[in-house]
Amino acid sequence: MQKLIGIDGCKYGWVAVSMKSDTADLFKSLADLINFYPESSMFMIDMPVGLSNIDLKERNCETIARKILSKKRKPSLFSVPCRESIYASTYEEANQINREIIKKGISKQSWGIVQKIREVDQLLQNNRSLVRKIKESHPEVAFHFLNSQQSMEYNKKTAEGQQERLQVLKSFSDRAEVIFNNSMSNFKRKHVSADDILDSICLAVTLEEMINSGSSFEDGNLDSLGIPMKIHYFNQ
């Protein structure tokens, strides 16, 4: 049976959720996570998949998604560094490379997840069969569409924001609250935060809804390595 997994980055490494389980799972590496699940599994991840580079300077899926979100939630979508810059060894070097290639600097927020962007990119380059199995999404965009095209009102780091998001998820699956509560009990906050767990549940729900409704996983623009650059969501 195919497992459908939502993935988010966290302080421990990665948090993954299947809506058929009772709790999230934590993994140190993305490769460990992928290998943990059956061969037929499909994944939706909150991390850039497919990158701009010197030959293809635009990754426009963030621009498109930014137009969808409310003013409050737009800042959650940041400009993704180009491929050359994510392999730089320092922030200063990466920032300079990015400015030279795509005429944009890199925010400290972006630099903070560069290691994870690199991990995704290396995994897909080394395992081309995973390109069709790992789909990119963004929790705020996914929540917007799960919530009848209304962006979330509250910040996901607040108690109000977490309750708001949990209510949306419960409208799709009564397992959402079970998974959230068990995961909050099972793991330390220094390893995974409440919003990480909710985001991974959101992507698992989104993936299930897309599969069950027969939604299309269109590739969107392909990067120079043939990897799709598209933020997926379930449009009811």
Image: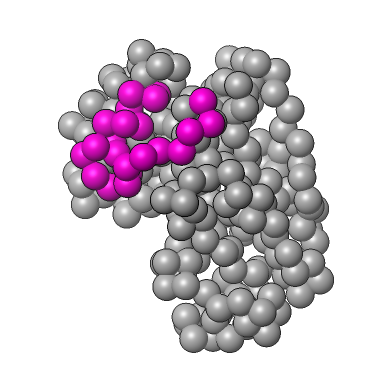
Asked whether 150 falls inside the magenta stretch, the response is yes
Residue displayed at 76% across by 41% down = 219
Residue 88 coordinates in the image, percent (x, y): 56, 79
Q: Relative to residue 136, is residue 37 drawn left or right?
A: left
| Membership of 13 in magenta stretch | no
Q: Where on the picture, by quarter, is residue 137? A: top right
Magenta span: 148-169
The residue shown at (81%, 71%) is: 55
Q: Position of residue 199 (x, y in %)?
A: 41, 38
Vertical placement of residue 166 versus 10, above or below: above
- Is 88 drawn above or below residue 226 in the view shown? below
Relative vertical location of residue 134 with respect to residue 212 in this rendering, above or below: below
Pick whichever, 69 or 109, lies toward us: 69
* Relative side of 128 to 16, left or right: right
Residue 201, given in percent of the width and then of the height, sits at: 41, 31
| Mark count | 0
List x then y, in percent, for residue 136. 60, 44
Quadrant in which the N terminus is drawn: top right
**Residue 162 at least partly seen:** yes
Left or right for 56, reference 102: right
Residue at (61% x, 54% y) in the render? 62
Residue 207 sits above or below residue 84 on the image: above
The answer, for residue 128, to whether it is visible in the render is no
The answer to which image quadrant residue 21 occupies is top left
Furthest toward the front, the residue is 71
The residue sitting at 58% across, 86% down in the picture is 96
Residue 123 versus residue 230: which sits nearer the camera? 230
